[in-house]
Amino acid sequence: MYALLGLGLTEEAAAFGDWLRARVEAAKDETGNGSGPLRIMYRIDGTSDLTEETLDHFDGYKGSRPVRVGNGASGQL
């Protein structure tokens, strides 16, 4: 946020602040005790469902395998 403000991007900084507040509120709702931890990563839409799965029917860069989508580390604290 500091970098955005330093560049004069005040609307973008405000939007990021709003996005972050929404994530904090969602974390409160998940735990039910009013104070939950934030996730280490989020999808671009703000959700945190990043379940990792392997796509066996695809080849990666130069035929590399396995091809995975998601991120298994998303559940870490």
Image: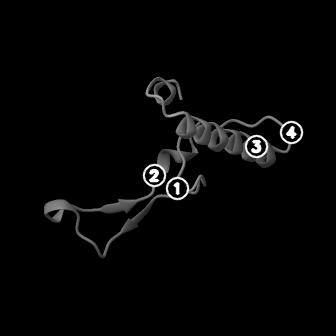
Of marks 3 and 4, the one in the foreground: 3
Q: Which residue is mark 1?
A: 50
- Secondary structure state at the residue bearing disc 1: loop
Quarter of image, res 39: top right
Between the C-alphas of marks 1 and 4, the distance is 24 Å
Instruction: Kindly state the secondary structure of the residue where label 4 is placed.
Output: loop
Q: Nearer the viewer, mark 1 or mark 3?
A: 3
Element type at mark 3: helix
* Mark 3, other Cα within 10 Å: few <14 / some 14–19 / many ≥20: some
Instruction: Indicate whether 71 appears above or below 35.
Output: below
In the picture of the structure, the residue carrying the numbered disc 3 is: 25
Q: Is residue 60 above or below residue 15?
A: below
Which of pointers 1 and 3 lies earlier in the amino acid sequence? Answer: 3
- Quarter of image, res 22: top right
What label sits on residue 21 in the rendered view? none
Label number found at residue 71: 2
In three-dimensional space, the C-alpha distance between marks 3 and 4, rounded to whole angstroms, equals 11 Å
Identify the residue shown where x is 52% and y is 53%.
43
Disc 1 and disc 4 in contact, CB within 8 angstroms: no
Gap in angstroms between the C-alphas marked 1 and 3: 19 Å
Do labels 4 and 2 touch, CB within 8 Å? no
Nearer to me, 11 or 26: 11
